Image (spheres, grey):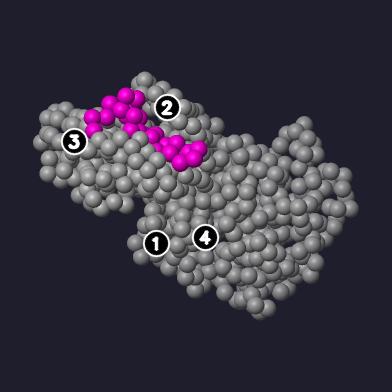
Amino acid sequence: MIKQPNAILGNEKLLVTMGQRAEIFGFFYPDRDFAQHIEESQGCLYDGKKLIWSTDHDWTSNQRYVQDTNIVHTELHRADGLKMEIIDFIHPKLPILIRDYKISSTHGFHGKFFYYSNLQVGEMQKKNSAYCDIDSNILVQYWKHYNIGISASHAFEEWQIGKALDTIWWTNAKYDMEDGELRRGKEDIGNINNAIGWKIDIDPSSEAKFTVFIGAATTRQSLYKQLRSVQDESIDKLFSDTHENWIKWLSRKRLLDIPDFAGFEFFKLELIEAFDRSLLTLSVLNDPEKGSFVAAPEFDHEFEMSGGYGYCWNRDSAEIVLSLLNAGYPDYSEKFLKWCRRTQLPDGSWFQRYWLDGNSAPSWGNFDYSTQIDETGSTLFAIEKYYQSLGKNVKKEFLDWIWSTVLCASEYLMKRTTDGLHESCIGLWETYTGIFTYTNAAIYAGLMRAAEMAIDYNETELANRWKERAAYIKKTTIKELWLPDGYFAKGIIHGKVDPVVDASILGSFVPFNMISADNDDEKYMIYSIIENIEKKLRVPVNGHFGIKRYENDHYIDGNPWIVTTLWLSKAYLELARSRIKSHGKDEEFDRLVVEALKYIRWSLKGRTKAGMLPEQVNKHTGRPAWAIPLCWSCALMLDNITMLDELKGN
């Protein structure tokens, strides 16, 4: 089942995704990509007659992040005066989700609070085993070396370990709750669900408090140790420590001084908020030990409507780490490039996508014709950008360390571009096989950047070879793919030039700079590309226009994407930066910035209520759509805001 989150939270070993009523969608441990251990987990009230689930539509939900943190605050209200407040955060050091509940009612409430879970430990719906250790106030479900435990600040008053598939009420924990009494089954095996419960007796002036802990460990002994430690800790102190950790992490960020732009004077605070939220989101989707990123928390586990998102693509991650580098977090680039060095294939390329540990992920890119060559170009591009950011004393050491990676990747690109255009492969959208403008631009940038490193490494002959090939690729791309209507074709598919307008042709300008705004002839090309993209790909929604991927795109109803829209705003800002050099801050500069701001503001309107940037925006409703949150969207938001900040100094 596809479940798209409204908020996420995590620490080094745990990633949790949840819906807008604080229901858990995903519980990933020990990595962001595997394993996902929870099918369903949420609070529930019993009023003496019926169950009141926290996911019932009778509740009005208000969910937000505590400012500058990855702590989630959810308030649920019902028309009858019942209120449930939930603060969710991950322990600062341990893989434990802390769920702090406060329940109140304007009319008082007399009943029970149940906490229900349907776990699939190790992503295994069968062959699980579970038991409830009443003496230790711990319920455990396990499979192989995965152990998931549920504990609480109050000792369980009731419990039930049941069969999730069983329709008999007294053996299924979910049905067993319906009469307000749990049968206290202590253990079972198979497809398991469970519930724990307590009595509630409050008047209108009081509230009931329950704190539920959900922890994960590789052994039963370590699970017990972790859960017992949080049982003995003050919840207020745990919250305070977590809050302080996130504030401290965010304090490393680039300090923004975004100038005021006419008509957008009150937009500055929203931009700063989006900058911070994008940083915090990326921090959770990164594996801090391995350096890799999931493109998005997996939500389509069975590949029902996509190929899945819970994997690492070099292309996406290359842009992500450069965005983080510019935002004040260079350590992400360093760790990711170590991961790249380790995962590079013997022929010098990188695979379509990976598990975070570097193993090849499920893929349709197993052959030369079905690989994605742009991944290799993008990786070289990121390596050199990071290299140039280093201090003089560190650069030589880094270049010595990375040189073999650069050499092998560059020679792979040389081998695949002997005719001036790359050999047939899959494009970045993973829809068509052929020769693509975007891929050629990525290869161009990769070889040009590699040549700069070769010069510093005293490999002048190699540098000249790579620059000559890059120039040949640029010349051939313009000759073969530039159309009379004033834009690059998507590419050559089935041996014919495909004239469809594709937003990815912006890659020829940003980020790969195959054509430059500092060249008058090429600047004309850039303006013409933008004009054609806006003419053919704009989708009206949320008071402005988002940009879809390409004409006649049918994936998820052809919605506009945040990535493609922020590419366009980034192109406008790059043109504005070039304009300053040649003409100063004139009317055309102001126009370019305003156009960029319109697309940035549109992108922010598509966020979840908690502030996360999705992959797409539903063209009918204006709501966030499909992969939520998407790392690539967050990275491009950082880029745009960083560029706005830089404009103040010009």
User: Which contiguous range is marked in magenta?
Assistant: 132-158
State whether residue 393 is above or below residue 500. Answer: above
Mark in front: 2 vs 3: 2
Q: Earlier in the sequence, mark 2 or mark 1?
A: 2
Q: Earlier in the sequence, mark 1 or mark 4?
A: 4
Q: Residue at x 52, y 65 (%)?
A: 549
Q: Earlier in the sequence, mark 1 or mark 3?
A: 3
State the residue position of label 2. Answer: 224
Residues marked 4 and 2 touching at CB (< 8 Å): no
Q: CA distance from mark 2 to mark 1?
A: 44 Å
Label 3 SS: strand
Q: Earlier in the sequence, mark 4 or mark 2?
A: 2
Q: Residue at x 79, y 70 (%)?
A: 419
Mark in front: 3 vs 4: 3
**In this view, which residue lies farthest toward the bottom?**
496
State the residue position of label 3. Answer: 112
Q: Position of residue 208 (x, y in %)?
A: 21, 30
Q: Earlier in the sequence, mark 2 or mark 3?
A: 3
Q: Residue at x 57, y 37 (%)?
A: 288
State the residue position of label 1. Answer: 618
